[in-house]
Amino acid sequence: MTRLLPRLRGIPRTLVFGAVLTLLVLGGTFLLDPYRNFQLATVAAYFCAAAGLTILIGHSGQLSLGHAALMAAGGYGYALTANAMTDAGIDGIPRFLLGMLGALVVSGALGWLLGLAAARLRGPYLAGVTLALVIAVPAVAAVFSGALRGDQGLQIAYDGVPPVLERLIAVEQWQAWVAILVAGVVVTALAALARGRLGLHMRAVRDDETAARLNGVRAGRVKVTAFGVSSLAAGAGGAVLCFVTQSVSPGAYTLAFSLLLVVAVVLGGLGSIGGAAIGSVLIVVLPWLLSTAVSAIPLPAEIEQRLSGNLSVLVFGALLIVVMLAWPGGLASLRRRRSHPRPRSGAAEKGDSRGSTRTESTLSRDVDAGSVDARGADAEPRHPEPALATPSAPPPQRKR
């Protein structure tokens, strides 16, 4: 994209790149069968939640173990709103858009409450709060069983292909289109936010909260905003998953699934949108490949039953250990290593004056820009401190 459009920089390039990539994925659905399109739609739903989680952990430094609860909030918000629209006689695309709005409102409100807690908690205390939230999902569904239908969950009306596209695509491809479009909008917005002023403030709070406060950054507001943005992305993913499966239930958003989202972003690479995409593909495709391989091997029924639920967990654990030992930056760091190879030892020892000058100028420019963005436009300018006078050597004494 940089070679094709060399004049684009920053957020405009992110928007163009997101639009082009979304169109390419939409075109790729014509090459897939219905089941593969269903898998692609599931990957797109998980991609929304994983992208929001990698922004939250990788950029703002806040650990969340309860993003499955935020996805459940989005799914239930979509289902309740869509069923209300069905009773009112509204269907089709208007019902979907209103359902998405309901999902964003519910998940955003829950994320805002978590953000208020995150502004006062950190580390294991914050992780404990989010962990308790995802554990409480089945209990909440049971307490409000009149509206949420308990463990059975909610079913929504069938959303078929619009009449204009009935002869062109199947239902699974239409669901994949909707999921890809929503994921494209959500992920592109997250990437633009990460490249902008909010992303700079989140990284400043993550690296040193005290220094960020001294430079005029409101750390509490940044934490609340980061949790709110991440919860909106997770709610959109839950709404898309409800649209694809035509139902939502607490059994689909367990603690194991919430931890699997964290594993996905760690495997892909914290803070990397591309890494979130890799992790989303892994958590959908890898269990399917393992189940296919186990069913193809003639095994006793007892062993096959034990492997069906535990083999994927074992493989994910082994894969996480291998990736953390070989590539601590995640699988997305492989592309960066190829594009920026390490210098040879001889060149590193001798040093390159041009490269060092360029590096120093780049660092100074980034530091200046970061300090201006962190302090804000209304902050008072800093005055350079006077240099300390170093004592000069004593004059030579005359010999007698």
Image (cartoon, rainbow, N blue to C red):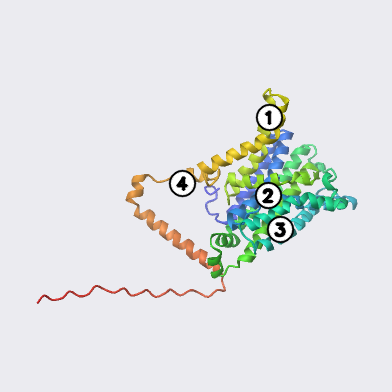
Looking at the image, the residue that sits furthest to the left is: 400
State if disc 4 and disc 3 touch (CB < 8 Å): no
Q: Earlier in the sequence, mark 1 or mark 3?
A: 3
Q: Residues within 10 Å of mark 2 (few under 14, many from 20)?
A: many
User: Which mark lies nearer to you, 4 or 2?
Assistant: 2
Kind of element beneath mark 1: helix
Question: What residue is shown with label 3?
Answer: 111
In the rendered image, residue 172, in percent from the top left (x then y), is placed at 76, 38
The correct choice, above or below, for 312 with respect to 232 in the image is: above
Task: State the SS at label 2.
Answer: helix
Left or right: 308, with 212 as reference point: right
**Going by the image, does 142 lie left or right of 209?**
right
Labels 3 and 4: the sequence-earlier one: 3
Which numbered disc, 4 or 2, marks the residue that appears first in the sequence?
2
Residue bearing the label numbered 1: 292
Q: Earlier in the sequence, mark 3 or mark 2?
A: 2
Q: Image quarter for residue 118? A: bottom right
Gap between marks 1 and 3 measured at Cα: 37 Å
The label nearer to you, 3 versus 2, is 3
Question: Relative to 245, is 275 on the left or the right?
Answer: left
Disc 2 or 1, which lies upstream in sequence? Answer: 2
What amino acid type is highlighted by mark number 3? Gly
Q: Circles 4 and 2: CB distance less than 8 Å?
A: no
Amino acid at pointer 2: Ala
The CA distance from mark 4 to mark 2 is 30 Å
Q: Residues within 10 Å of mark 1 (few under 14, many from 20)?
A: few
Pointer 4 residue = 340
> Label 1 is placed on what type of residue?
Thr
Residue highlighted by disc 2: 49
Q: Nearer the viewer, mark 2 or mark 1?
A: 1
